[in-house]
Image: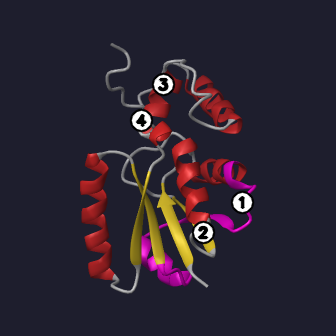
Amino acid sequence: MIRAVFPGTFDPVHYGHIDIAQRASRMFDEIIVAVYDKPLKKMLLSPEKRIELVKLALNTTSNIKVTGYSGLTVDFCHQIDAQVIVRGLRVFSDFEYEFRMALANHSLSPDIEVVALITNKDHTFLSGSTVREIAALGGDVSSMVPPAVEKALIERFQELGSDQSIVPHTSLRD
């Protein structure tokens, strides 16, 4: 059996993540979507909420499981006996970052392979930060995230009120 880990912060999970997870589920016996709980960047949603939303988004695919984790991804892979790390590539800059990460992970654990899937063309613009910023500005993210995620984002931004410094804004305000 080949078990693969699809790690990320999933803050929030979006259709690009869902596409990669579902495509990977056709390639491997089991996919563990691993929601990282202590990233260096500030998160909009709690680890528990992110796990809940990923589970809701992927509950129709029987060989996908969702869990949280901390520490090095390769250590997590060893803990759950996973042989592969799955990553998604959207744009050229993703390749450089993922290439460096794959080399670092291979240096730490040569027994774990990294497989990168090219995103569906419809999802190339999607990123968690883009979705967060559009939602923070009151924009419509219904084409980017499942309904439960959209609802959670609306609720979270209502909870934050005018204190939305948690979402760094790029150019969508201009």
Name the residue that disc number 3 marks.
134
Between residue 6 and residue 52, name the one nearer to us: 6
Does 74 lie within the magenta span? yes
Label 1 sits on a secondary structure element that is loop
Q: Are marks 1 and 2 in contact (CB under 8 Å)?
A: yes
Between residue 169 and residue 5, name the one nearer to us: 5
Q: Residue at x 68, y 31 (%)?
A: 151
Name the residue that disc number 2 marks.
31
In space, the residues marked 3 and 4 are separated at their CA atoms by 12 Å
The kind of residue on which mark 4 rests is Phe
Tell which circle, 1 or 2, labels the residue nearer the N-terminal end: 2
Tell which circle, 1 or 3, labels the residue nearer the N-terminal end: 1
In space, the residues marked 4 and 1 are separated at their CA atoms by 25 Å
Q: Are marks 1 and 3 in contact (CB under 8 Å)?
A: no
The kind of residue on which mark 1 rests is Thr
Residue 138 on image: x %, y %: 54, 18
Name the residue that disc number 4 marks.
125
Name the residue that disc number 1 marks.
61
Q: From where the camera sits, is residue 11 visible?
A: no
Tell which circle, 3 or 4, labels the residue nearer the N-terminal end: 4
Q: In this view, does 104 lie to the left or right of 143?
A: left
In space, the residues marked 3 and 2 are separated at their CA atoms by 30 Å
Please tell me whether residue 138 is drawn above or below residue 44 in the rendered image: above
Does 1 lie within the magenta span? no
Extent of the magenta region:
57-83
